[in-house]
Amino acid sequence: MPNPNSSSSEVPTTLVVVVNWNNADLTSRCVAALDREATAPEGADFEVLVVDNGSDDDSVDRLRDGTTGDRLLALTRNGGFAAGVNAAIRHHPADRYVLVNNDAVPAPGFVRALVAHVDAAPTAVAAVTARLELEGRFVQVPTTAGRPDDFVAANGSRWRRDDHGRTLVNSTGGVVDRSGNGLDRDWLVPREAVTGGRDVFGFSGGGVLLRASALEDVGLFDESLFMYYEDTELSWRLAERGHVVHHEPAAVLVHRHSASSGTTSWTFVFHNARNRIKVAVWHASVTTVVRAVLRTLVRVLTTTARRSPDAPAVRAALLASLTGLPADLRHRRELARRATYRRRDIDLTTGLRRPGVPGR
């Protein structure tokens, strides 16, 4: 259990977890911002634990020699983001866990805003997700003038870094679309134009506070996913058990998007494509599962025809999804037996149960 020794009479404890893999510079920058908040007069009361996820560079030595010091948990192998977070939770039990991507810098008052929100919220609120903003400024460019390094919004608009541009939002939580895609709500929306409200289906693992009591109910992150979609999958389990996720706009992280793995790497493409299908099979409607598989099949055909460098990773992801289908269907049935609410009765934008839907 995350914190079997806590009692209602004690002041709740908060552990901030930062997972590092081969990037001590970014991690040190993140931890320094957290330390500034911890020592500020109005700062929150929390501890920081850095998990090195089996780095094969000099990260462990550099982090130990730096300000991280004895706040480092060094793992011998890279089991993925989920394994790193789970190791921290098992190693250092607390009442609340705040997860921060190592490629993000918390704004002043970040932890305090999350803690204040959860302290004032009903116990059904299992997670409070932060507002992630993209590092730098951006201007919108014509779609006909696109470049590979542009950021592309859901509506097809393209944004490019420019010091004279606008601040764009990375995430105000997670939603799931009809094809099983786990998406960042308010992705590439200018900061002043954000419309996402308090209630949201899922949290962003890049910046969130999780209640230990909710994790005791539904379990920790699923380590078989290795990386990507772990937050979407855990959000599904929380929703199926009646827990809800809130968004706190005052908790701000400035995020260097995909600085650790890159959005064009084999690792990114494979795990995103495979895990989208896998999580859909575990939790989503049959229609959504079919759409997820067909979408990936179409992507295999188009990337192969264009001789895209993504093609091998997408093919491998589809093959892995199909060969793993029998085990994933068994897992789906097991999750359904544990659920309090049926998947079709959960709103995949707000996470709320549809009106008039009771638990089982």
Image (cartoon, grey):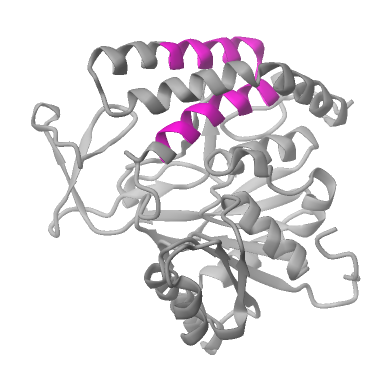
Name the side, left or right, on which 202 lies relative to 20. right
- Looking at the image, which residue is at 60% across and 64% down? 114
Magenta-tinted stretch: 268-297
Instruction: Assess whether residue 48 is covered by the magenta stretch.
Output: no
Using the image, determine if residue 205 lies above or below residue 232. below
* Viewer-proximal residue among 13 and 350: 13
Q: Quadrant of the N terminus?
A: bottom right
* Viewer-proximal residue among 61 and 332: 61
Looking at the picture, how far across and down is residue 61, in whole percent? 48, 79
Looking at the picture, how far across and down is residue 152, in whole percent? 27, 35
Looking at the picture, how far across and down is residue 32, in whole percent? 45, 79
Name the quadrant containing residue 91: bottom right
- Looking at the image, which residue is at 46% across and 40% down? 184
Using the image, determine if residue 6 lies above or below residue 178. below
Using the image, determine if residue 276 lies above or below residue 108. above
Instruction: Assess whether residue 280 is covered by the magenta stretch.
Output: yes
- Looking at the image, which residue is at 86% across and 31% down? 338
Circle count: 0
- Most common SS among magenta residues: helix
Q: Quadrant of the C terminus?
A: top right
Does the rendering let one see residue 34?
A: yes
Name the side, left or right, on which 274 lies relative to 268. right
* Viewer-proximal residue among 248 and 138: 138
Residue lying furthest left in this view? Answer: 145
Does the rendering let one see residue 67?
A: no
Looking at the picture, how far across and down is residue 246, in whole percent? 62, 49
Name the side, left or right, on which 207 lies relative to 217. left
Name the side, left or right, on which 44 lies relative to 261. right
